Amino acid sequence: MEKSLEYFKKEFQLEDRDLRSYSPLTLAYLGDAVYEIMIRTSLVKKGNCAVNKLHKKASSLVKAQAQSRMIGYMEEYLTEEEYQIYKRGRNAHSPTMAKNATMTDYRRATGFEALVGYLYLKEDFQRLVDIIKIGLRGITNE
């Protein structure tokens, strides 16, 4: 994947920037998409099934409440740097809020998404996969 990302950056003339320069809401914006594509890819690769079933399962894993629960399982495994990124995202004041989510879940989910976006831009894919596995394992074993 690293080679593919390098090709993407080269072809679209994308320069690496200081990750600290991104706002936490920008990181969350990207992290939301990255996490969703990871979940959808995982579900599709596990076997072909009806799109409606895929959608229901994906929706249950990407909603704010699930992300909030996931970060609860991940927190103890985060490095200090990762925890600070999560906190910046969690504490960012967004002009919108998700439907069907409490303010607490929405903010924690925003922190989770900021961390996902950060790790993606950092190109630390192994770490990204590892912490998402921890979170998913936690919520599926509840």
Image: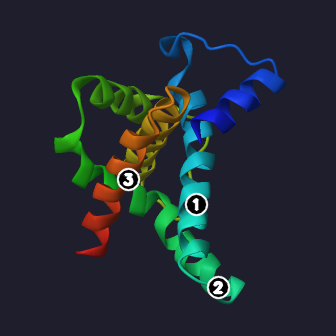
Residue 69 appears in the rendering? no
Percent across and percent down for residue 36 are: 59, 56
Percent across and percent down for residue 74 are: 25, 48
- Gap in Å between the C-alphas at discs 3 and 1? 23 Å
Task: Left or right? Give the position of 101 relative to 30.
Answer: left
Counting the numbered discs, the total is 3
- Please name whichever residue, 101 or 67, is drawn nearer the observer in this view of the structure: 67
Tell me the number on the disc at residue 48: 2
- Which residue is rendered at x = 24% and y = 37% of the image? 78
The N terminus - image quarter: top right
* Mark in front: 3 vs 1: 3
- Return the disc, 2 or 3, that comes first in the chain's sequence: 2
Q: Secondary structure at mark 1?
A: loop
- Which residue is rendered at x = 69% and y = 13% of the image? 15
Tell me whether the residue at label 1 lies in contact with that at label 2, contact meaning CB atoms closer than 8 angstroms.
no
Which residue in the protein does label 3 denote?
132
Q: Quadrant of residue 16?
A: top right
